[in-house]
Image: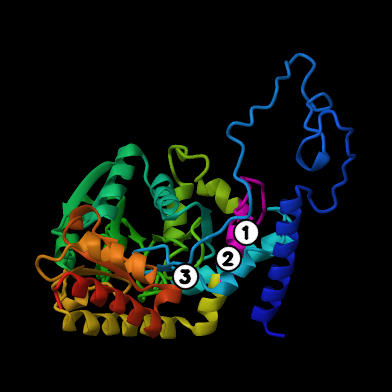
Amino acid sequence: MSIVNRLNQKASLSALGRVLASASGVLPGASFTKTAAAGQSFAGYSTSTSNTSIRPDETSHPIDNSSKGPTGVIDIPKRYLMGPGPANSYERILLAQAQPLLGHLHPPMLKIMDEIQEGLRYVFQTKSKYTLAVSGTGHAGMEAAIANLVEPGETVVVGNKGIWGERVADMADRFGANVVELKKEAGKTFSYDELKEAVETHKPAVLFLCQGESSTGVQQSLAGLGDLCEKNGTLLLVDTVCSLGGVPIFADDWKIDAIYSGAQKCLSAPPGSAPLFLSERALQKLKSRKTKVRSYYLDMNLVGDYWGWYNSRSYHHTGMVSTWYGLREALAIVAEEGLEAMWKRHMACHEQLWEGLSAMGCKPFVQDPKDRLATVNTIVLPEGTDAMALIKNAMDTFNVEISGGLGPTFGKVIRIGLMGANAQPATVALVLDAVKDGLKKQGKL
């Protein structure tokens, strides 16, 4: 029996048991004594607080049921998530999350965490010991990187060419950094010479760049920047939230010092895990801090120990058990496909999308083809098109999510994501049908 079939069978049975137990109001293995008529409530079991664990010095009160709920079994509509994320997950990943819970320090759970770390080494292309999944979304990864690598008063040069540069600048400021923003018009990227001048002038502790800027649809070149930063005593920090697994990155060979990402985009895992990588230089910076990391929850001295970075395991917080099942399975799917094949698949879908969009009179927001991000595409519709009406029609008619612009592109573009499980010829054809239908209904075709 294949692993998919095994997951299918196990997940279906265990999920069915939980649903039935939930519907009856009784947990598996629990036993209750049925009460007499007085005080009976749901399924005939007592709701009285007379036998509860309320303290002797506390006063019991009647239960307020005015906000009681939800009730029934959850019902989720089917959507094709073709916006900037999250992307749809493979069924195998969703079924993995239906597996029984483990304790967050149980040996089988620690093994899963080890497998996640190894899978992240592959997608980051690093041999560094220092990979893990931060408990939280991509913003948690962003904040973890800033909180651990920046001390108050240090200079951070932020390449701001969209909303994620803006947020890193804001976040670094909150942690007491001297923030130097390099700003670039939406749809453009920074040249090596611009970045070289900034690093050599300001000698920052950290240079931040977003590889895939989902608000503008640009992919920033990282060529030569690792050597530049190393020469100037600067750490190179890169955001790959919407690019990891979709476009090439080589953490070690490009001498990147820190990368954070999101699990819910090209990896097709559920939201809630933020892949993180630190180089040896970055770890040395963390260990040589003069001040304590200002965030307890995101302190990699502590979180790293939970993940075994320092050859021990100690409790820090309750890990995202079911979410990490999904991430582990997503990384297994990446390994089975292979990174090169995965990168090629994303680029092929990007080219298929633009072939279809160009035939409809749509134009790319990013003018330079080499700067166009394959995973999140920013599209200028034919003049006079009501973008919001087109987006609504895609959802109402095709169950397809298409997004409008964000930050500097708000009101200027629509955005179509081709990430992970959704980077397939059939889903590209579906989203093209949705755009075509929307344009036809507005008399643009």
- The answer to whether one can see residue 18 in this image is yes
Q: Earlier in the sequence, mark 3 or mark 2?
A: 3
Where's residue 52, x and y in %? 80, 28
The alpha-carbon separation of the residues under discs 1 and 2 comes to 7 Å
Q: Is residue 25 left or right of residue 383?
A: right
In the figure, 102 relative to 420: above or below?
above
| Disc 1 element | helix
Q: Amino acid at mark 1?
A: Ser
Q: Residue shown at 35%/60% (left/top)?
A: 239
Spot the residue most to the left.
383
Which sits in the foreground, 436 or 58?
436
Q: Amino acid at mark 3?
A: Leu
The magenta-colored residue range is 306-329
| Disc 2 element | helix
Residue 419 is a magenta residue:
no
Which sits in the foreground, 149 or 242?
242
The answer to whether mark 1 and mark 2 are in CB contact below 8 A is yes
- The answer to whether one can see residue 200 in this image is no
- Residue position for label 3: 267
**Tally of numbered discs:** 3
* Mark number, residue 322: 1
Q: Amino acid at mark 2?
A: Gly
Q: Earlier in the sequence, mark 1 or mark 3?
A: 3
In the figure, 37 relative to 206: above or below?
above
Which sits in the foreground, 128 or 95?
95
Residue 326 is a magenta residue:
yes
Q: Is residue 426 left or right of residue 222?
A: right
Which sits in the foreground, 63 or 410?
63
Spot the residue most to the top.
57
Where's residue 351, x and y in %? 27, 83
Quadrant in the picture for residue 309:
bottom right
| Disc 3 element | loop
